[in-house]
């Protein structure tokens, strides 16, 4: 009896999840397309609030170029940012990565209490730009506008919500 109940429960959950995914996909693909004018600006992941530095964020330029910045709080990440070109096709966004900025260090040390976010940080780090040897167009990701009424303009890129901080990709605020 327990096996029958468990099988029925799992079956119902699969049906519900499949139906939900189909509705989400349909509404996402039918949402208004995003233009280069819409996407131009600075988009921060997860929140419209800016603290002492930005979290993970994109800078999209109208000329089709972008810069993707990893979370600046992560003091142990080797790749700091990625630069390249982007392409919009309906609700698909694809990229060609042309370069990345990498961080190198002599070693790892413990972070300073109260000033460093993480327990471990890179020691005596420096950065360098590394060009991609064979830039190629990456597989597209899905992009759509979030239709919820809110103070901030939001988009989803591959099911991750980004908040528009500025229409100017060189300024961190429209204020």
Image (spheres, rainbow, N blue to C red):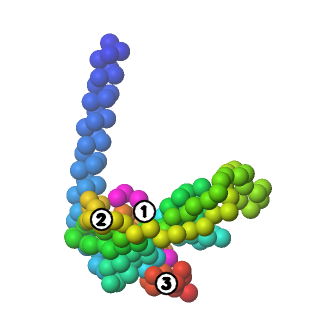
SS at badge 3: loop
Residue with the mark numbered 3: 170
| Horizontal and vertical percent position of residue 78 | 53, 58
Report, in whole angstroms, how far the alpha carbon at label 2 lies from the one at label 1: 30 Å
- Cα distance in 3D space between marks 1 and 3: 21 Å
User: Residue 102: x, y in percent?
Assistant: 51, 64
| Residue at the image point whose x is 45% and y is 82% from the top | 169
Q: Nearer the viewer, mark 1 or mark 3?
A: 3
Side of 81 relative to 76 (left or right) = left
Residue shown at the point (21%, 70%) measured from the top left: 90
Within 10 Å of the Cα at label 3, are there few (<14), some (14-19), or many (20+) other Cα atoms?
few
State which quarter of the image contains the N terminus: top left
User: Disc 2 vs disc 1: which is toward the camera?
Assistant: 2
Relative to 61, does residue 73 appear above or below in the rendering?
above
Name the residue that disc number 1 marks: 161
- Between tags 2 and 3, which lies in front? 2
Q: Is residue 104 magenta?
A: no
Does any portion of residue 146 appear in the rendered image?
Answer: no
Residue 126 or 77: which is nearer the viewer?
Answer: 126
- In terms of sequence position, does the residue under pointer 1 or pointer 3 come before the other? 1
**Mark 2 crowd level (few <14, some 14–19, many ≥20, 10 Å Cα):** few
Q: Residue 157's quadrant in the figure?
A: bottom left
Residue 134, disc: 2
Chief secondary structure of the magenta span? strand
Q: Which quadrant is home to the C terminus?
A: bottom right
Question: In the figure, is residue 162 to the left or right of 97?
Answer: right
Residue at 45%, 85% in the rendered image: 168
Tell me which segment is drawn in magenta.
158-165
């Amino acid at each position: 009896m327990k096996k029958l109940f468990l099988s029925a429960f799992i079956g119902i959950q699969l049906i519900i999840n499949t139906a939900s995914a189909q509705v989400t996909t349909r509404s996402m693909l039918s949402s208004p397309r995003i233009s280069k004018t819409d996407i131009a600006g600075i988009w921060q992941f997860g929140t419209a609030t800016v603290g002492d530095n930005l979290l993970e964020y994109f800078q999209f330029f109208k000329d089709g170029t972008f810069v993707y910045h990893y979370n600046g709080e992560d003091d142990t990440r080797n790749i700091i940012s990625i630069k390249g070109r982007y392409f919009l096709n309906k609700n698909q966004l694809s990229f060609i990565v042309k370069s990345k900025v990498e961080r190198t260090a002599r070693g790892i040390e413990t972070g300073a209490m109260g000033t460093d976010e993480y327990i471990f940080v890179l020691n005596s780090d420096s950065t360098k730009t590394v060009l991609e040897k064979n830039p190629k167009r990456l597989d597209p990701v899905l992009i759509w506008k979030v239709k919820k009424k809110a103070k901030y303009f939001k988009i989803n890129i591959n099911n991750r919500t980004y908040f528009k901080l500025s229409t100017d990709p060189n300024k961190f605020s429209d204020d």
